[in-house]
Structure formats: C-alpha cells, structure tokens
Amino acid sequence: MFRKFSRSFTVLLIISIIFQLSTISVFAAETTSTIGLEVDGEIVISSVPPQLINGTTMLPLRAMSNAQGAEISYDNVNKVIFLTIDGHVVKLQVDSNQAEIDGKPVTLSVPATVIEGNTLVPLRFVSEALNSEVNWDAKSKRAEVISAANLVQLTNVKGEVEVFEEGGWRPVIVNERIKQGSSVRTEEGGEVTLLTNEGSAMKLEQLSETTINEVNKDKLTGIIKVAFDLKSGTAISQVTQKNEGSEFKIISDGTEFIAPDSTFQVKALDGIAEVSVITGNVIMDNPLLDKPLILPTNTYIDGISKDIQPKDPIFIPDDKLKEWNNHKVWMKDQIIRVQDDLVMKQQLLINFANQVPENQGNAQKAIMQQLEHLQERNNSQQLKVREITPRFDIEMPREQNDNLMSMQSSLYDFVKNMPQNFVQMTENQKKNMLTKQVIFVDQFMENHKLNNDETFTKQAEQLQGNIMQFGEINKDDIQKNAHLFNNGNFEFKPIEIPEGTILPPGFVLAQGTHIKDGMKLPEHVMLPPGATIPNGFQLPTGASLPPDVKLPPNFVFPDNVVLRPGFEFRGESQLPPGAHLPPGFVLPVGTELPKGVKLPPFFHVPAGTNLPDGVQLPPLVNLPDGVLIPNGAFIPDGTVLPNNVQLGEDVNFGEFVQFSSDFNPEDMGDRFVVPPGMEFKDGMFVPQDFRGTIEIDATGNKVIVGEDGVTQNINEIGLPQLPPGFNSKNPPPNKQFPPNGHPDGQFPPNGHPDGQFPPNGHPDGQFPPNGHPDGQFPPDGHPDGQFPPDGLPDEHLDGQFPSSPAVPTGEQPPPLPPIQ
C-alpha cells in the first residue's frame, strides 16, 4: 500500500511541477513579449524593452522621456520620480498606481514597476504625462509616439474646416492634434486656429489652405522649428518668444516670413503675397533679395513674388490697419492664453523645486533654465501688450493682472527664500532672474499708466523695490539684460511715417523709424532702441526714451518724460517737471529734482539734494541723514527715516513708517501730527486696529508678527498677495490660478483643472467620472455620464453609444489594442 501511495504521490508531484512550469512559462511569455517603441519616427533602444504585463503595455520611462527631451530626477529614499518637460511637471512613485501630472492626481491602471533598474509605466500614462500622442500598431506590435512639440493643435473652429491626411480630406475634430505633412483648409465662413506646443498661434481665415511643412523640436538643444506653407488665403500669426535659434515660419510661393516674436498677417493668392506686421519684427527672405529684409512693427509690403524684386517696406496704410480691428479680440485672447500658461508653468516649477532632492543637480539646473526662459517670455508678452494697446484699445482683465503680479511675487519669494534642498542657483543666476523681474514690473506699470490704471502701481512699485534691494540690482545689471534686435546678418531699412499721419497716444515707434524735423509725434510716444533725435526737435509730453537714445546738444526734455530702465543721465540738461525716473537711476550730485518728479523704488537721494514740495517718495527710498522732508510730501509704508530728519508742513505718512532711535516728536512741535487711524508706538506709526506685535529679528531689523503668527518684514508691506490658499509653499491641488473660478481663488471639489465650473454640468461643480473634458454630460449618453471606451468601433464623437456597432455579418469586431 505504501508503494502504491508513493507511486501516486510521485505522479501527482510531477504533474504539479509540470503545471507550475507551464504557468511560469505562460506568464514569462507575456511579460517578455517583444514590443517595439518608436518616438518621433526613430526606433528607441532600451536595456529593458517595452513589455506586455497583465494585458497592459508598459514602456521604459527613462528611454521614453530622454527621447522626448524630458529631464528626470529620482528620490531614492522615497522611490519618487520627478519629470519635467516644456514647463510641465510629472510625479510618480514606484509600486504605486497614484501619480500627479501638473499637480493633478492621476490613477495608473497598473503601478509603475522597476525591472532591471528601469522604471516601466503604462502606455496610456506616458501619453497623458508627456502630452504625447500614442498610437498602437497591433500588426507590428509597436508603440508609435509623437511628442507634443511635434504636433499642432486645431482649436477655435468655426464653420467648415477640413484636414487632409493619408490621401483624403475629412472634417476637422475640434482640439485634435495633427502632425507634419498634414494640411488644413477652410470653406466660406470657416475659421480655425493652429496652436504649436510652445504657444504660438496661427489663425486661418475663410477660404484658406495651409500645409504643415515642418514641426520639430531638437531634443538636445530645445530648438523648435515650425513652418507653414500658405497655399492660399489669409493667416494671422501671434508668435511667442522661443529659445535662441528657434523659428516660426510662413512660406508663400518661395518667400519666407520668419517671426522671432511677432504678430503679423500674410495673404497669398495666385503666387502673389502681402504682409503686415503689428508687433515685433518679421524677417522676409526672398530669392531675389541679397540679404533677408527686416520688417519692423507697423510695416507693410504687397506684390511679393519669387519672380519680382520685393518693394521696400512702408508704414502700414490705414485700410490695412482697419483689417486688424477684426482680429483684436483674437489677439487679446492669445495673449491671455499664453500668460495663463506661463503663470501655471512657473508656479509648477517652483513647487517642483521645493521637492526635488538635493543630489539631483541636473534636474535643479533644468528648473532654473526653464524659469529664466519663462520669465523672458513674460517680459516679451508685456512688450507685446504695450505695442498692441494704443492701436486697438486692448485692456487686460483685472483678474489677469492680479495673477501676473501674484506670480511675480511668488517668484521673488522663491529666489529670496531658496529651499534648503535647492543648491543649484548661482549668485549670477539669482541676479539675472531678479533683473528680468525688475524689467517685467517696469513694463507692467507702464502698460497700466497707459490705461490710466493706478490700481497696481503701489503693489508693483513695492515689489520692484524689494527685488532691487534684495538683489542689489543697479543700472549696469539692467543694461546687460536689455535686448536689442541684432541686425548684423540682415538688411534693415529705416521706415518713413507719411506726413499728416495721426498716431494714437502711447504709440510705439518701430526700430529704425526715421524721426525728422516737423514730424508730429503723439503724447506718451515710445521711442525705439537706437532712436536719434534731430537738433532742435521737441518731443511731446510723456515721451518714453530708451537707454541708448541719441540726444542732440542742448536737448530739452519734455514734461513728464519717461526714462526707461538703463537710462544714464549725465546732467547735461535739467530734468523737466513730472519726469519719470527708471529703476537703478543714478542722480548726479547737484542735479535738482523737479516738481512732480516720479522717483523709482529703492531710489538713492544724494546728500544735499533738495526734494520738491509734494514729492511722492517711493518704496524703500534711501534718504541721507538730516534730509528735509518738504511740505505736502508723502512717505510710503515701511519707510525707514534717517537720523536728524526734518519735517515740513502737512507731511503724509503711510503705515509702519519708522523713525530713528534719536527722534523726539517734541522737537518737531506742531509739524508732528499723528495720521488719522494710527498711533505713534515703538518709534513708528502703527494702525490702531493692528493686533499683532512688532519684534526684532536676528539681523536687528523690526518685523511684524500678525495674529496668525506669520512674520513679515516691514519693508514688504503692500506686496501683491496670492489668492487664498495659494502661495509658493501651499498651492491648491492643481497649482493654477482659476481664470474663471470662484472669486476667492478656490476650486470646486472634483472640478475641472482650470478652475471653471461646467456651464452645463452638475450644479455642485462636479464632472462625470469619465465625462467630456468640457464638463458637459452627453445629451443621449449613458445615464452615468460615461462615454464609450477608447477603441470601440464607430465610436460617436457626440458622446453617444452607437446603437449597433457596424460589424459586417460573419466577422468579429477588431480586438482592442493593449493600451490601458
């Protein structure tokens, strides 16, 4: 019996082993199944290839990301991976199916896993995280990935618009992305905007057709090249600033229009083109030109052909300018879209910098490079607003301006209070970043003065002063950061403004404009870099002068003149009444300050200088000992007064103005008057309703400690505040300023990532779990608000389930690709 049992046990054991081996073999076959990976047309080789695990296609994250130019850092302690690309931030954890894309929680169908030192993630996650387009070729078992930078999105679709792909025309799908080689055309009444990944936009008007000749990003240099071949019709483009060497190009029958950072229009018909430029510069290259020709702001050329010598550019005619009025809403929308995107990306990178490990030097360097690049683009957008506003009376929304100033405050806070883990910002980088901020705030204030909007002046001046004080920014730093158009390899022809032309107030003259005797310029005109003023020429009131302007002998400055950042005043003439002095301005000893002068933040008043009556002192003004504060002067919040200060009559004080320790109010007699609503306490004017305390910090300076325990330097009173719950250390879940969200800056629970409440969604602001991205429920869809799963044959675009899938009789529907 024992032998029978032993024989039976042996047989069972052998069967069990065979079964286990077969099971292992089946699983191994699934996990090691050969799957190819192609990124932007190139085969990607990795030590661990893409694999099929439990029915899910898994891709090697590092090989995949490197192929698209992303930067990866790894926190070995917490097994957290950080990834940045084009200002976007991705965070995921090994062995967890929870991740974040731009701060938004995402659930992976299969947890990220490590095989032979390589992290593998689901294919669908790669598509969402890197904003790429992923296609699955079931026949060849290959995942084909197209980077976001190599795609063009079609949005703002109106009327009939068609796309040509793979040999035929078809109706456009709103917000779809198309690749190089595709064509787009509009019928009568049709219109569409083509967006590049970096933010440039081209609007194709009705009865127009274009082909995407090139859309490509160099993964090593970051250079992006985009080229549209305009076959016929009208294209209006608004180009954002790109990395040096990048190009945005429109081609019309052999003539190329290359825009570094511009707003321009090209019309093409029967091989003849015309171009008009509204902002920035456009480079025109034609086979008959010896050198490419620069077309500056407000210029126009018609009759352009590869067979005819191009004309010289002229000042844009009135009839062509009227055409642009039809596009002013579109131009404004594009500026807002780009600014919102820049604000979001800067905040995401700041949040990322607070988390990235200290040993991830490359990731930290990438963060700094992206932050600097984004700030340069912010500055460029402000100049674009300045150029467009006088022409088309465009004014940015209040909420938009709030967000911009709050972001600049957050960026300053990041640079000043650098996280301990962040060690890669050099002193030179810090100064460069802060100098770019000074220039941004200066241009921002000028734009609001143009609109007679003083709402942001106090906050902007306070922020600018704090930046200059902390970064020790001076005139030379600002001059080094000034950007002039390099015309060394191009032909540049001066532009003549026709006699009798009436320019609007605040008009921006194009670089190269010839200013001649008898020319009538408008008030607050902005002169271009390198402008030359003729002898005896009188500029209008409020004229804005660049730092490199060439002035004639005995030049008389106009009243309310605006001297731009970097301007060096040598005392060759007197400053006029109401002069606006730029940040970093150095006042020569002995120069008299005129009545109504506008002093910049952090201004140094030389000893012996007489301040004019009624002067408005700027934030963080540096006053000499014994200075006389004149009659009717205003002293801003947080000002520290020097020793032996003397007060005139009717001096107005802000909050927390500090007097020196030797100050005795009794010495001032009747001239010392405590402002209404304040009391004199601890050597300063304190609001009567102030419930905090005033303490001395480690550096010996006085600080304000509020009721909530938050400490604030006195000289930072008045800085722009972030929306509730949003600051550089405690942002809301999605890190965005809600452009149309709740006025308190809060987001609806489970709401849309842009903070908007769905117009036709649930009243509580919630969206269906798998609902349409615009927050609407499909009118005839499933009652649970879900849409057909990807890959369902004949999936309806309106969110409805097809009543009967179109599968021929006797055939099985095609299998779904293994994308989860």
Image (spheres, grey):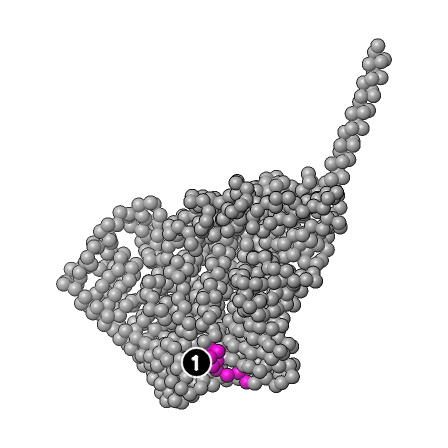
Element at badge 1? loop
Q: Position of residue 63 (x, y in %)?
A: 67, 52
Q: Residues within 10 Å of mark 1 (few under 14, many from 20)?
A: some
* Residue 106, quarter of picture: top right
* Residue 186, quarter of picture: bottom right
In depth, the one of 523 and 571 nearer the eye is: 523
* Residue 468, quarter of picture: bottom left
Q: Position of residue 76 (x, y in %)?
A: 60, 44
Q: Amino acid at mark 1?
A: Val
In depth, the one of 819 and 729 nearer the eye is: 819
Stretch of the chain drawn in magenta: 312-321
Q: Quadrant of the N terminus?
A: top right
The answer to whether one can see residue 176 in this image is yes
* Residue highlighted by disc 1: 549
The answer to whether one can see residue 247 in this image is no
Residue at horizontal 82 percent and vertical 14 percent from the top: 5
Q: Position of residue 348 (x, y in %)?
A: 50, 53
Residue at horizontal 24 percent and vertical 50 percent from the top: 689
Whether the magenta-drawn stretch holds residue 435 is answered as no
Q: Quadrant of the C terminus?
A: top right
In depth, the one of 162 and 371 nearer the eye is: 162
